[in-house]
Amino acid sequence: DYASAKALWQEGLDIWRGLGDDEGVARALGDLASVYDLEGEAERAIPLYEESADLLRRLGLEYELGTVVSNLGVCLMSQGRLDEAAKLYEEAVELCRASGREEQLVISLFNLGRVSMLQGRHETAAGWFERALEAARELGYREMIAYCLKGIGEVLAARGTGEQAACLLGASDRLFLELGAHVESSEQATYAEAVEQLKDALGDDAYGSAHAEGEAMSLDQALALARAIPQ
């Protein structure tokens, strides 16, 4: 119930403000922003995330700041503010490294790949996706492995490397299915665009065969294929 959640976090925010507790205010702002974010109200979430980030920077709370700037980057990216989003993701990478937040680091590396793709910088995107994939593999972070395989497949689709791209998308699809993971709507859109590109380039039958080949791969085989992609 988003309405109840917003009311509770707003009440908490008002209490922290009344107490003059900046750390409590910063946390409550981030939590309230995340509810608006989940509702798809990025324009309402952005100023809350920005205020939270400013307070967390001033307080030196790097651990919490890494999450807030990453979430803010996602909101800005959804609004087409790609350069601003990229700077925040770069900040998030450094913060996560400094505070030892390994899973959030993987997400931030992946987000740098995503924003690079949206900027049309496909080779840069490939590099970020590869770094995120390697970090996710070391952690055994299977959901982000699936996202990274998908991201690299989309880079290959944009390059015109059709069969490898379809294989990686197939491997990603299988992993998402095994995990029962929900693919974010923004990621569904980039996936659909890649599939359309691949079907146009290969034809439906060849795309289907390559996708099925990827679905049949073991995780180790899919990772080996992703690593073999030239930068």
Image (cartoon, rainbow, N blue to C red):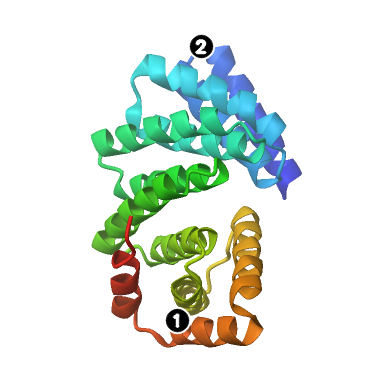
Looking at the picture, tell me which residue is in the foreground, 50 or 80.
Answer: 80
Name the residue located 48 percent from the left edge and 70 percent from the top edge: 165
Name the residue located 53 percent from the left edge and 14 percent from the top edge: 19
Local crowd at mark 2 within 10 Å, few (<14), some, or many (≥20)? few
Q: Secondary structure at mark 1?
A: helix
Q: Measure the alpha-carbon separation of dots 2 and 1.
A: 56 Å
Looking at the picture, tell me which residue is in the foreground, 83 or 103.
Answer: 83
The spot of residue 126 in percent (x, y) is 40, 53
Q: From the viewer's perspective, is residue 165 above or below residue 19?
A: below
The spot of residue 5 in percent (x, y) is 67, 42
**Residue 120 in sight here:** yes
Q: From the viewer's perspective, is residue 179 above or below residue 41?
A: below
Label 2 sits on residue: 20
* Camera-nearest label, 2 or 1: 1
Where on the picture, by quarter, is residue 8?
A: top right
Local crowd at mark 1 within 10 Å, few (<14), some, or many (≥20)? many
The spot of residue 201 in percent (x, y) is 60, 72
Name the residue located 25 percent from the left edge and 33 percent from the top edge: 98
Q: Mark 1 belongs to which amino acid?
A: Gly
Label 1 sits on residue: 214
The spot of residue 101 in percent (x, y) is 30, 43
Q: From the viewer's perspective, is residue 17 above or below residue 211?
A: above
Q: Mark 2 belongs to which amino acid?
A: Gly
Name the residue located 42 percent from the left edge and 60 percent from the top edge: 148
Looking at the picture, tell me which residue is in the foreground, 72 or 216.
Answer: 216
Q: Secondary structure at mark 2?
A: loop
From the viewer's perspective, tell me whether residue 63 is left or right of residue 203. left
Identify the image quadrant of the C terminus.
Answer: bottom left
**Residue 110 in sight here:** no
Tag of residue 194: none
Question: Disc 2 or 1, which lies upstream in sequence?
Answer: 2
